[in-house]
Image (cartoon, rainbow, N blue to C red):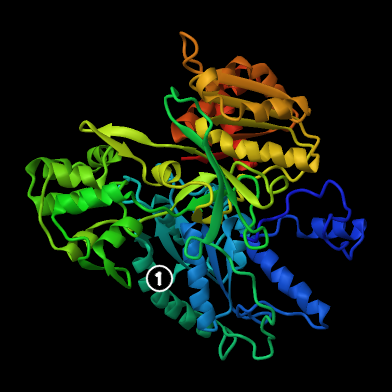
Amino acid sequence: MQTNRAVSAQPAAVGPTPGLPAAPVNGLQLQRLTQAIRGLTGEQLTWASGYLAGLAVGRPALAAAPVAAAGTARLTILYASQTGNARSVAEALGRQAAARQLAHRVVSVADFRPRDLAKEQFVLLVISTQGEGEPPEAALELHRVLFGQGAPTLTGLGYGVFGLGDSSYAQFCQAAKVFDTRLAELGARRVIDRVDADLDFRPVSEAWFPVALERVEAELAAASPGVAAHRDAEVVPLRFPAPVRHDRDHPFRATVLDNRPITTRDAVAEVRHLAIEIDPQAIDYAPGDSLGVWFRNAPALVGAVLGAVGLAADAPVAVGSDALPLAEALTARLELTRLHPTVAAAWARLSGAAELAGLAQDREALRTWCQSRQVIDLITQYPARLQAADFAGLLQPLAPRLYSIASASAETADEIHLTVSTLRYQCNGQDRLGGASGFLAERLAAGDNLDCYVLENPGFRLPADGDTPIILVGAGTGIAPFRAFLQQRAAVGDPGRNWLVFGNRHFQRDFLYQADWLRLRKAGVLHRFSPAFSRDTAQRVYVQDRLRAEGAELWRWLDEGARIYCCGATAMESAVREALVTIARDHGGLSADGALAFVETLRADARYLRDTY
């Protein structure tokens, strides 16, 4: 979910900003600078800012990370992240490598040429798994190259893999397993065995780091005798403090400006619009990014959990390296509203409940059972007694929730907007409320503070060429990033055509941001709009049905180079992909196999981009 987004568009105009001194560069110089930094990662932009500052005082200021002299060995830490966890692990690994004075770099696979693996000597790959065993979107090109014809020979590469996943899924850490096996098949030498980390990955990573770096350090020393693997003594450290990077471990304290429903009272689900004030000098974002939100569990829920397990609120417990009262741990540090199968399986052993123990024998059945329950449902249905420390140790750590950003900094640089659906449901006749959505909807008002951070999503970006037409397909709150996309295109004056396909239940009750679409339509920014309100007609019509109905026009747009985006639930994206295959067959004249291959080519060429949940 940072002061390090890549610039994706030139400014619409160059001129003085009211209240600020005139820029010391002319329009042409600013245009050249914008072009020079286009596409740089956050890490590269941070380095460049220090480098330029050094030039201003007469000497370049090099990055503080150890660097290798020409011709010496270096460690490359690659990460492929979907929700930011793999990135945080890779950066923490990089910090430990820096502390050891190991020459290294930390790079996203999105910014790495897959065939350059053959030029690397040592790589540690940190990769998460999404969906049913798929690699993150950013790693699709790496997967294609390594598994395609003409895959590079990697006999000169030493490597290790750190996997992140969720053990409640059958394909736990599957992406890490696949890449680990394939690298070995291509001749790479496994320096350290793969590690598969569950949701509570920090203890696993902290134990793996020193072992992995010791192995790499020994390999680097053998590859480059002497001090070649370490910092050159003549390298000048960065003399200017790097800007603070706000991430899940260092969130930004924002202020809520607005929090209001944008659906009617009789809508099936309440959706709220939040406006959050930020400091654009401290936190930055781009269309397509998400906001990670830290929240606190509801006091009533904490009280109910304490009562169900018969434990005192002030009972001392340890969470990580922190000692705190149990009630505070349950409020701010431990997961209560997402019931993980590992917690249910452990509780089956503690409670001795035969029914729960039988359910725990079937991983998929247990996962399905947990999806509609919270911790309170587990401990009330199957009572057990245990000590406070044991209960706290049983639960998963609280994790921030991610929401697609629904605004563009080009229009609101000092605000971030969110579109939040309040999760409400029943379990065994009891009302249940989502953890983060309930916190945002019921316990956060204008003027309150919110700890948050931007999670960059470089695999879900507007085209660098503003002339490129785009087709945006979103259902429900999946419309959020497309509001940001269209705001951005309007603000910078991109001339490319824009087509929005939006689905929800009712026109009158949950037509999200209707006024925005009307305004953009009137301004000539939104060229085509295709709504799909599924419950306003006898026969339900969804976004995939609207795509098929307008298939001929959609094919024309694709034939003219359009890029298509899809945001929403995983099942919705799957239906959209099937619709694209049908359109390629019916309107593109392709065979069934050819249509499938066409859609896969769209993905490989970054012309079909997805953001699913």
Residue at (60, 77) in percent of width and height: 65
In the picture provided, is 501 more to the left or to the right than 219?
right
Q: How many marks?
A: 1
Q: Position of residue 61 (x, y in %)?
A: 73, 80
Q: Nearer the viewer, residue 148 or 303?
A: 303
Q: Secondary structure at mark 1?
A: loop
Residue 590 can be seen, yes or no = no
Query: Is 382 drawn above or below residue 317 in the view shown?
Result: above
Query: Is 345 drawn above or below residue 469 in the view shown?
Result: below
In the picture provided, is 185 more to the left or to the right than 45?
left
Query: Is 250 drawn above or below residue 59 in the view shown?
Result: above
Residue 286 can be seen, yes or no = yes
Residue at (35, 67) in percent of width and height: 204
Residue occupied by mark 1: 192
Quarter of image, res 314: bottom left
In the picture provided, is 57 more to the left or to the right than 191?
right
Q: Nearer the viewer, residue 119 or 519?
A: 519
Residue at (7, 43) in percent of width and height: 354
Quarter of image, res 117: bottom right
Quarter of image, res 503: top right
Residue at (20, 41) in percent of width and height: 362
In the picture provided, is 396 more to the left or to the right than 604?
left
Q: Position of residue 312 (x, y in %)?
A: 17, 61
Q: Residues within 10 Å of mark 1 (few under 14, many from 20)?
A: some
Q: Nearer the viewer, residue 587 or 570?
A: 570
Q: Which amino acid type is marked by label 1?
A: Ile
Q: Position of residue 56 (x, y in %)?
A: 82, 77
